[in-house]
Amino acid sequence: MAARTNARRAAPFGATLLSLLVLVVVAGCGGGQASTAATCAIRPAESSGGAATTAAGELTGRTEIATLAAGCFWGVEAHFAALPGVVDAVVGYTGGSTADPTYEEVCSDTTGHAEAVRVQFDPDVVSYEALVESFFAMHDPTTEDRQGPDVGSQYRSAVFFHTPQQEAIATAVRERLEEAGAYDDPIATEITPAGPFYRAEDYHQDYLERQSSRF
C-alpha cells in the first residue's frame, strides 16, 4: 500500500489508549474468542427519519445509514464512532447467504458474510462522501479478502450502499483514488447493494471502548 501521512492532534489519555487498541485490532482480530452470547435478532440496515441524540447530547435532525466493511469490525466501529456527526455505530454481519449467523459461523468463512459496521450519521454534520473517504483512509483497500494477518472473505473491504446516490458517491471516491494513484496496488473494495444486516453478539458491541475503560 502506498505510504500516506495523516495529521494527528494531541489527544487525552483515554482517546490515545483507544487509538492504540484500534491499532492492535488492525494487527490481528482475536478470531479464536469463544462466544458465550446468543445471536441477536435481525436488525435490517435502513435509513432513519427520526431525531437522534449525539454522544454530546446535541439533538440532530434527519439521520442516514452507511454500512461499511474494512476487516475486523472492532477497530472499524471505534473509528467511526469517534467521528463528529456519527450518532451510532453497530457491529454485525452482512453480505452473506446464511440467516442470523453466529460469530463462529462467520469466522468459518462459509456464510459469505463480512464483518461490517452500520453507521447512523447526521448528514448535516458529516456527509456520506466524507465517511467513505475516511473509510478508505483507515484501512488497506487493496488486499482482497484480508486485512493484515486476518484472512478470509469475512474481512473483505466493502461498501454496502443503501441508495443509488450512495452507490454513485462511493464509486466516484474509489475512482478518484485510483486515478490519483493513491495506492501502489489496485483497489479491491467491493461496492455492492446493502442486504440484511445481522447485529453481532453483545460482547462485540463497543468492544474497544469497553477494553480502554478497564485501564
Image (cartoon, helix red, strand yellow):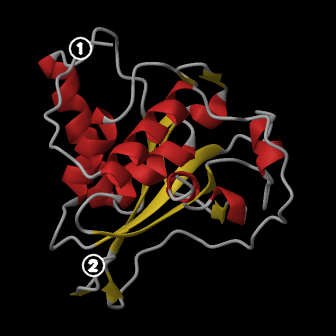
* Residue furthest top as drawn: 184
State which mark lies toward you, 1 or 2: 2
From the viewer's perspective, tell me whether residue 64 is left or right of residue 156. left
- Name above or below for residue 177 compared with residue 102: above
The numbered mark at residue 56 is 2
- Name above or below for residue 34 compared with residue 109: below
Query: Tag 2's secondary structure?
Result: loop
Q: x%, y% of residue 106? A: 75, 43
Q: x%, y% of residue 38? A: 84, 66
Nearest the eye: 26 or 146 = 26
* Residue furthest front as drawn: 215
From the viewer's perspective, tell me whether residue 78 is left or right of residue 100. left
Q: In the rendered image, which quarter is residue 191 located in?
A: top left
Nearest the eye: 51 or 185 = 51
Residue for badge 1:
3
Is label 1 in contact with label 2 (beta carbons under 8 Å)? Answer: no
Nearest the eye: 72 or 154 = 72
User: Which of marks 2 and 1 precedes in the sequence?
Assistant: 1
Distance of mark 1 from mark 2, alpha carbons?
34 Å
Q: x%, y% of residue 127? A: 19, 61
Residue at left 59%, top 71%? Answer: 44
Q: Amino acid at mark 2?
A: Ala
Q: Amino acid at mark 1?
A: Ala
Neighbourhood count class around disc 2 (C-alpha, 10 Å): few under 14, some 14–19, many 20 upward: few
